[in-house]
Image (tube, grey):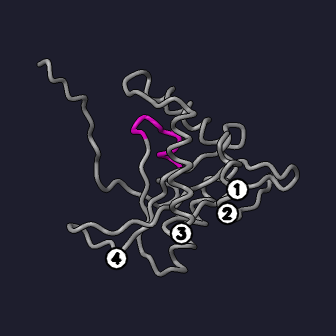
Amino acid sequence: MTFRIERAHARDLTKVKHLWKVMIADYERLSDGVWEVREPGEAWARRHQQYLEWINDAGGIVFLAFDPDTDEVVGYAALHLVTSGAAFDLGESYGDVETLAVLPERRGQGIGLALLNACQKELDRREIEYLSLETLASNTGALRLYERAGFQPFMVRMVRRVDFDE
């Protein structure tokens, strides 16, 4: 099946709200009650505001994947440009894929990989050398995609609940 990738404008962001909510539902399922997931509406309000800020201050780009027959958005990637830290030389800045979401019925069709390639091309155009992302450790489907796309483990984020009653 075919699709096309386009760069989003701020006015296009409402077109990805349904995909964001699908991703939040995936997080709920994949976290299996171990981690609290925000209510989808609240999560979207927070992320929507970030997307607007990134697009308006040139700190990020959102790419949309469209079904050319229906013009429906079937996937998207949000690329955030991040200042490199002190320890590792990733250049002055690097790209971080903050969100990659594809409709469940459209997964496995190359949309996620095409969106990652769009991010990579944008970074190449800007002469930025590194691209990062993170996903839930239990998201084996996404991990397989990212490995196929050339990503490899770098840092491990570990989280625990702070219990002051202990």
Instruction: Name the residue type under label 2.
Output: His
* Percent of width and height locating residue 32: 44, 23
- Which callout, 1 or 4, points to the residue nearer the camera? 1
Residue 12: which disc? 1
Position of 121 compared to 103: left or right? Answer: left
State whether the magenta stretch is mostly helix, strand or loop: helix
Q: Quadrant of residue 4?
A: bottom right
Instruction: Name the residue type under label 1.
Output: Asp
Farthest residue toward the top?
165
Image point (32%, 71%), residue name: 90
Instruction: Name the residue type under label 3.
Output: Gln
Total numbered circles: 4
Mark-to-mark CA distance, 3 and 2 = 19 Å
Residue range (magenta): 136-145
Q: Earlier along the polypeptide chain: callout 4 or callout 3?
A: 4
Answer whether labels 4 and 3 touch (C-beta < 8 Å).
no
Farthest residue toward the left?
166
